[in-house]
Amino acid sequence: MILPSTYTMTKNGMFARLVVEEDAETIIALRSQTSARFMSTVEADVEKQKAWLRAYKERERQGLDYYFLYFKDGEPLGLNRIYNIRKDSFVGGSFVFKTGCAFELPILATVMQLDVAFNVLNLTVCFANIHKDNKKALKFNLLLGSDLIYEDETEHFLLLTKNNFNTYFSKFEHLL
């Protein structure tokens, strides 16, 4: 299945949609925060970001990658991606949320992202790599049912199955 370019999702007052070229400045602002310190750096060049987004939208049309922008009360708060989609697997990442937002919003965004990947796109395996210094992200991913499959000097590599996600998520969904 390929998501339409107009795809949106809403859960518990959070709204998300696929990014568009006009989001370039917002993406740069979010990716330039200290909370994005575990991600690859992004140039503060709006035209380069727009060019990157145009190429990204082509991958989206092919069903290979999806980049989401999350909003609460109309304010853009965060980003994450479903990317490197292969037969039944994907990578979940590029996760950043506005510094100082309510702690449950990034958790909800991750759940929304995984729900789309597993239960809308019907993918069955999620891979993620988390910087070793990002202890909160590692702990949360393990709580979701991810398994640590490998680590190197700087990264933890995780695998999360659709069955684990749906089982673990059902246990704490009521908390969101």
Image (cartoon, grey):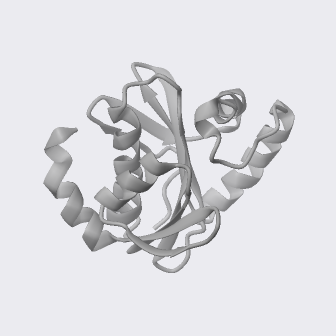
Q: Is residue 144 above or below residue 68?
A: below
Which residue is at 29% across, 57% downward? 143
Q: Nearer the viewer, residue 56 or 79?
A: 79
Residue 151 pos. (x, y %): 55, 72
Horizontal side of 108 relative to 18 (left or right) equals: left
Which picture quadrant has residue 30?
A: top right
Which residue is at 75% across, 44% downward? 41
Is residue 123 at all visible to an observer of this figure? no
Which residue is at 55% across, 76% downward? 86
Residue 165 pos. (x, y %): 29, 64
Q: Nearer the viewer, residue 33 or 174?
A: 33
Residue 17 pos. (x, y %): 49, 40
Q: Quadrant of the N terminus?
A: bottom left
Q: Nearer the viewer, residue 7 or 127?
A: 127
Is residue 142 at all visible to an observer of this figure? yes
Q: Nearer the viewer, residue 36 or 135?
A: 135
Horizontal side of 160 relative to 90 (left or right) equals: left
Q: Is residue 83 above or below residue 15?
A: below
Which residue is at 50% across, 53% downward? 4
Which picture quadrant has residue 167?
A: bottom left
Q: Quadrant of the C terminus?
A: top left
Q: How many marks?
A: 0
Which picture quadrant has residue 28?
A: top right
Horizontal side of 42 relative to 17 (left or right) equals: right
Residue 148 pos. (x, y %): 43, 71
